[in-house]
């Protein structure tokens, strides 16, 4: 172990030259017991060339000490303070890329592996389809139900997947960039990243055959109000950067008229509008109107680039 700019590293892993190197990155924040169970389940993995990296966000609950004592094969980046979910993952992603990862798994500490062949199957799928950028897994909640999609039979292309457990081609980060650290607490950064990946021409695919147990929101339950605030703020930012602007006006109109396509709307449209409004308030309170203006300019630049790219493709 050695120190570098306040970070500490411990090296270990399962290596073989015959299969692509996969780095499994787990961000941890005061989740010692959850992390222990997650790491214990990872030992079931039947794949010869993977490494597990835990990025600890300044926990003081003995998480790092537990890893060193019980899981010496696990690599550690111990951050001096909580830098947020996205930024902590970025530390891990940079580290994995420097160490030659071909694929990177982002895994929450409140997950557990169910199938020992999960990694083998994910690699096999990615190796066959070079246009796939991200694979999303079937997240199984404690009640036994699937967290994400109703279709549990066939893989399918989707707009976004949860980063509670996701498999990403490493070259994606070199082309698209890293997770946006503005999504501080870990809400909407996965949606934002999936939009960017699709924008660059890669597919996002949901694979129901690969099942991962997920407690869901286990780390955030201790801070419900803060999570609600930042969640609304992050959703607003994602909406402004990625969603079609006309959707906001659709929600606004339906919230007051109450009719959409000749039928009474569901309350979800009203809830979305309220969430958008609250996110706007939180964002302006945090960033000021100057920050809001910068966000609008960033969106306009992105839209302009998209128009230019579309025209170039038409000419070709």
Image: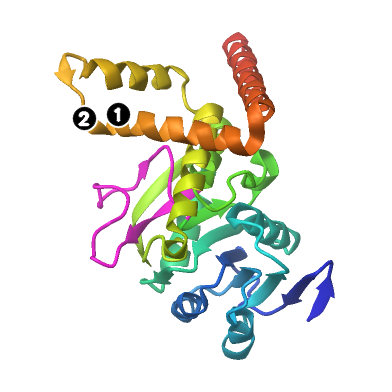
Helix, strand or loop at label 2? It is loop
Instruction: Report if the CB atoms under discs 1 and 2 are less than 8 Å apart.
Output: yes
For the point 66% across and 58% down, which residue is it? 83
Of 125 and 91, the residue lying toward us? 91
Q: Which residue is mark 2?
A: 266
User: Residue 2: image x %, image y %?
Assistant: 82, 78
Of 18 and 36, the residue lying toward us? 36
Is residue 288 at least partly visible in the picture?
yes
Magenta residues, start to end: 134-163
Is residue 131 at least partly visible in the picture?
no
For the point 51% across and 31% down, which residue is it? 280
**Label 2, residues with CA under 10 Å away: few <14, some 14-19, many ≥20:** few
Residue 267 in magenta stretch: no
Estimate the spatial distance between the alpha carbons at disc 1 and disc 2, rounded to whole Å: 6 Å
Helix, strand or loop at label 1? It is helix
Left or right of 91, for residue 67: left
Q: Which residue is mark 1?
A: 269
For the point 55% across and 72% down, which residue is it? 30
User: In this rendering, is residue 43 above or below 156?
Assistant: below
């Amino acid at each position: 172990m050695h120190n570098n700019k306040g970070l500490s590293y411990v090296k270990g892993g399962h290596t073989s030259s015959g299969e692509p190197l996969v780095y499994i990155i787990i961000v941890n924040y005061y989740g010692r017991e959850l992390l222990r169970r997650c790491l214990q389940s990872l030992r079931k993995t039947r794949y010869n060339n993977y490494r597990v990296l835990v990025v600890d966000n300044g926990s003081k609950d003995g998480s790092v000490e537990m890893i060193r004592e019980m899981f010496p094969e696990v690599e550690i980046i111990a951050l001096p303070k909580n830098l947020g979910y996205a930024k902590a993952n970025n530390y891990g992603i940079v580290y994995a890329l420097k160490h030659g990862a071909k694929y990177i798994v982002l895994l929450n500490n409140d997950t557990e592996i169910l199938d020992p062949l999960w990694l083998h199957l994910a690699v096999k799928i990615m190796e066959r389809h070079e246009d796939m950028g991200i694979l999303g897994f079937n997240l199984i909640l404690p009640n036994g139900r699937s967290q994400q999609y109703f279709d549990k039979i066939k893989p399918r292309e989707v707009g976004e997947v949860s980063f509670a457990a996701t498999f990403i081609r490493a070259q994606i980060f070199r082309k698209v960039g890293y997770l946006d650290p503005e999504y501080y607490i870990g809400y909407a950064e996965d949606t934002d990243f999936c939009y960017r990946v699709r924008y660059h021409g890669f597919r996002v695919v949901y694979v129901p055959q690969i099942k991962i147990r997920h407690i869901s929101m286990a780390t955030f339950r201790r801070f419900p109000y803060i999570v609600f605030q930042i969640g609304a703020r992050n959703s607003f930012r994602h909406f402004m950067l990625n969603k079609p602007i006309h959707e906001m006006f659709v929600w606004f109109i339906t919230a007051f008229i109450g009719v959409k396509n000749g039928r009474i709307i569901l309350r979800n449209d009203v809830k979305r509008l309220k969430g958008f409004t609250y996110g706007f308030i939180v964002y302006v309170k945090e960033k000021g109107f100057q920050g809001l203006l910068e966000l609008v300019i960033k969106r306009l630049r992105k839209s302009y680039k998209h128009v230019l790219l579309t025209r170039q493709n038409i000419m070709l």
